[in-house]
Image: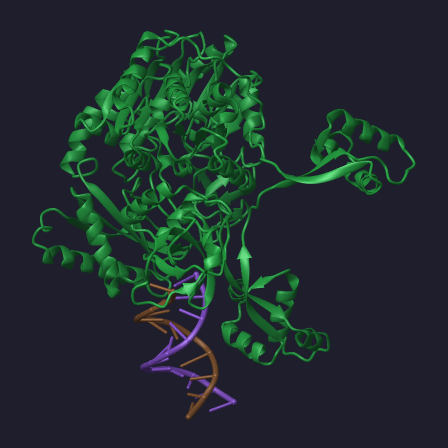
Chain colours: A green, B purple, C brown
Amino acid sequence: MIKTPYISVAVTLPVMQSYTYRVPDQLKAVCSPGMRVLVPFGRRRVTGYILSGQESCDGFTAKKILDVLDDHPLFPESQISFFKWISNYYIHPLGDVIKTALPSGFDRHDVSCVFVTRQGRHSLNNAKVTPGEAQVLESILQKESCTLKQLVKNSKNTTINALIRRMEKNDLITVSAVLKKDGATIKKEKFILCGDGPKTALRMSKKREKLLALVKKKQEISLTGLKAKIPTAPALIKPLAEAGYVKIIQRQVFRDPLGDPVEPDRPPELTAEQERVVRQVQDKSGQRFSPYLLSGITGSGKTEVYMRLVWDVIEKGRNAIVLVPEISLISQTERRFRARFGDKVAVIHSALSKGELLDQWRKIVLKKVKIVIGARSAVFAPFENIGVIIVDEEHDGSYKQETGLRYNARDLAVVRAKLNGCPVILGSATPSVQSYQNVVLKRFEELKLETRINRHPLPEIILVDLKNYKDARGSDRIITPTLAQAIRACLDQGKQALIFLNRRGFATFPVCMDCGKSLSCKYCDITMTMHKGHNEYQCHLCGYARSVNIKCPECGSKKIKLLGFGTEKVESMLKALFPDARLARMDQDSTSQKGATIKILKSIRNRNIDIVVGTQMLAKGHDFPSITLVGVICADLSLSLPDFRAGERTFQLLAQVAGRAGRGDTPGKVIMQTYNPEHFIIEASRKQDFFEFFQNEVPYRKALMYPPFSRMIQLKLSGNSAAKVKVYAATVAQVLKAMVEAQENQKDLVQVLGPIEASIPKISSRFRWQILVKSPSSAMLNQLIKSMMDNPKTKPKSGMRLIVDVDPYSLM
DNA sequence: AGCACGCCGACT
DNA sequence: GTCGGCGTGCTC
C-alpha cells in the first residue's frame, strides 16, 4: 500500500540512481515496496522495483507507471536497506543487485523484434528482392521471433544496420518493441477430481474404468500422477471431463526439487562440547548482532550444532538462513537439515530449474517455510525477522560470485546479520585467513569443537617426495611405488581408495616434436588438453575443441607428443596396474550428463567401485564411510599459481581431501605426493594443523600488505584489440594514480599497482589487463573507484570492458 | 542497456 | 553533396 503520489523505483539497467514515478490513484492500493512495476524509461519499457513512497518529484516531471507486475512483494521492505548496502559497497546498480538476488525469470523489458510484413513475404516468394534482403527475410522467418540484436549478431554482412533500415523503409519488414518476459512462471498443474455425475453416458472401456476407479480412490490426483499409472491418461481424460464423469481444475503446485525422500530423524543428545558451544551463542546473542567463527575439526559435529541453534531460533518464531558451498550435489548438510526439519525447509541451489527456484522463493515470501538452506544466493532469501545466519565451510571459494555482481555471500551474511541484529556463525575445519584474523582482532568470537564425535583418530598422512622419482620409468613417476603398494593393500582388505588430482583430461601439455611449440587454443593463451574419451583436444577456458588427428598448426608436423597428465591418464594407469579393481572417474567430463554424478556417488557408497579417481568435486562435502585410502597425485599443483591465496587454497583443499579418508570404523591413511615436502603449506597439511598454517601465512600477507592486512579492489580490463586494451588500462591506471597523488590524505594509504597483463593474457579472443588497488581503508578504496568511474576518460569505449571486483577472491 | 544527437569519412 | 559510421550523453 502506497499513500504518497510518487514512488522511488530502481530500474533493471546499468544506472546507479533510482528514479521517481507517479502512481495513478487507482494503483496506489496495490503498490507496495518490493513489488515490480513496468515503467517507461526513455523510449522503452523496463522492469523496476518499488523502493519506497515519495512525496514529491523535485524538479522533474515524473512519468506514470504503466503497470504493477506483482500482487505480493517479492521481498520484504526491510530487505531494501541490505540491497542498498550491496549496491554501494560493490559499486553496482541497485536495480541489478535486486535482479541478481531474485530468482531469474522475473524481468520484463522491451526488446526490438523484427517481423516480415505481408509485402515482404510476397516479395520473397516472387523473387523480387536482392540476395542480401532474401537472406535477412529468411533468417527472420526461420525463427518464431527474431530480435534485432540476434539478427545483427548472426549476420556476416557488415552493413546490416543500413540494410535493415532500408528494408523497413521499403515495407519489407517492421521493427517494433515487444515486451519480453523470460523464463519461469508459477506452475499450475491440472488436478482431476470426481465429477458431479455423468451428464451423458459414455461407453466404458477397461482403461476408462481403471482411470475412474483411481480418481475415486484418491479423491484428487494430479494429471502427472495419473500419467505415471496410465500413460494415455491425458487423452482419456478429455471426453470423461466433457461428459461430467470427472472435473479438471488448475492449481498452483510447488515443484519439488528434492528427488530423494529423506528419512526424518530425531535430535541426538549433544556432547558436552557441543552443548557448551550452543549455550555460548544462545546466552550471549539474543536479538543482537554477534559474529562467531566455529572452528571444528572434521567429524566434530558442527552440523548438529547448527541444527540445534536453528531449532532454537524457529521455536522463538524467527527464521534461519543456512549457507552451504555450491557443490555438484545436494550436500550432506542439506539432507540432514531436511531430515530434521522436514517441510519447514526451502532449498536454493544452482541445480534447481528456474521454475523450481521460483517456487522455493515463493514459499519463503509467503511464509510457508522457516529455514532456507542453499548456496550463495540463499543469502538473499526474502525473510523478515531472521534469528540466525549460518555459513558452513565459510572458507569455500564458491561463496564468491565471479560474474555480474561479484559478491561474496559469506561477507554478505555478516552484513545481513548486522542489519538484522542477529548472530551469524561461520563454520569451518579450515577457516579462511580472513575470518581467523577477525578472531585474532576480537571482531569474531571463536567457538571450538576439538574432539571427534566417534573418537576415530585422524588419518595418518604420509608424504612422498616426487623429486626422487623424476627419472623413474612408466607410471612410477605418477603413481609412485609407495602409493601403488598402499592401493594394493587397501584393495586386498576389500576397502575403497580415492585418488585425487586437480586436473582433468588425458594429456595436459601436447607438444610438437618438430618445432617444439605446444598446442594452444586459437582463442585463448593456454595449451589445450587431450581428452581420450572424446578423442579431441579441448580448451578448458573457452571450450574450443580440435580433432586428435590434427597436424601442428605451427609447422604442419604430425608428431605431437602428449606430455602432462590429468585424471583420465591416471585412470588408465590405474587400470593397467590394478586390472582386477573396479574403477570410476569423477570430474567435469564424466559428470556432464544429467544424473551421472548421482550414479557415480551411489556406486561408491554401494561399494560397486574399488578405486575412484577425481578432481576437487570429489573432495568436497561427501561422506564415504568405506574409503580408507586417499592418494594425492600431486599436492602442489595449485601451490604455484600466481595468486596470493594459492597457499591458503592448497592447504584447504589438501585438508579437505585428507578428510575423506577413514570416515568409517577403519582408520584412514593418506599418501600425499609432492615436489615440495618441506614447504610450510604441505607440512601444515600433513599435520592437519590449521594454526601452523595460519602462523606461517600471516607474516607473508602482512609484508606484502595483502588481505586481511589491506582491502583490495581489482579492475579487470579487456577488449578485442591487444593494443587498445593496453592503452586503455594505462589510461585508467594513470587517472587513478593522479587522483591518489592529488589527495594528501590518500597518498600513503592507497596503492595503485599496475596495469599488468593478466596471467592468462587472452581468453575467448579477448585481451586482458588488470589493475590492483590496495588500501587499509575500505571506504577510501570505494570512494576512489567511484570517483574514478565519474571521470569520462575511464569510460570503456568500443569493444572495451571494465569490471570492478571488490574483495577479489582470485587475482588471476 | 538502448536510443537520439552530433561529428567525420566514402559513396550515390 | 549525403548516407551511415561511431563517440557521447541521457533516461524520472
**Nearest to the observer: residue A317 or residue A752:** A317
Q: Residue at x 71, y 76 (%)?
A: A122
**Nearest to the observer: residue A3 or residue A697:** A3
- Residue A789 in the figure: left or right of residue A621: left
In the picture as drawn, the residue positioned furthest to the left comes out as: A744
Seen in the picture, residue A540 relative to A287 is either above or below; the reply is below
**Nearest to the observer: residue A664 or residue A174:** A174
Location of residue A581 (image quadrant): top right
- Residue A413 in the figure: left or right of residue A149: left
Location of residue A605 (image quadrant): top right
In the picture as drawn, the residue positioned furthest to the right comes out as: A203
Residue A86, percent from left and from top: 31, 45
**Nearest to the observer: residue A503 or residue A209:** A209
Residue A367 can be seen, yes or no: yes
Residue A679 can be seen, yes or no: no
Q: How many marks?
A: 0
Residue A575, percent from left and from top: 53, 23
Image quarter where the C terminus of chain A lies is: top left
Residue A540, percent from left and from top: 45, 43
Q: Residue at x 54, y 29 (%)?
A: A597
Residue A800, percent from left and from top: 35, 61
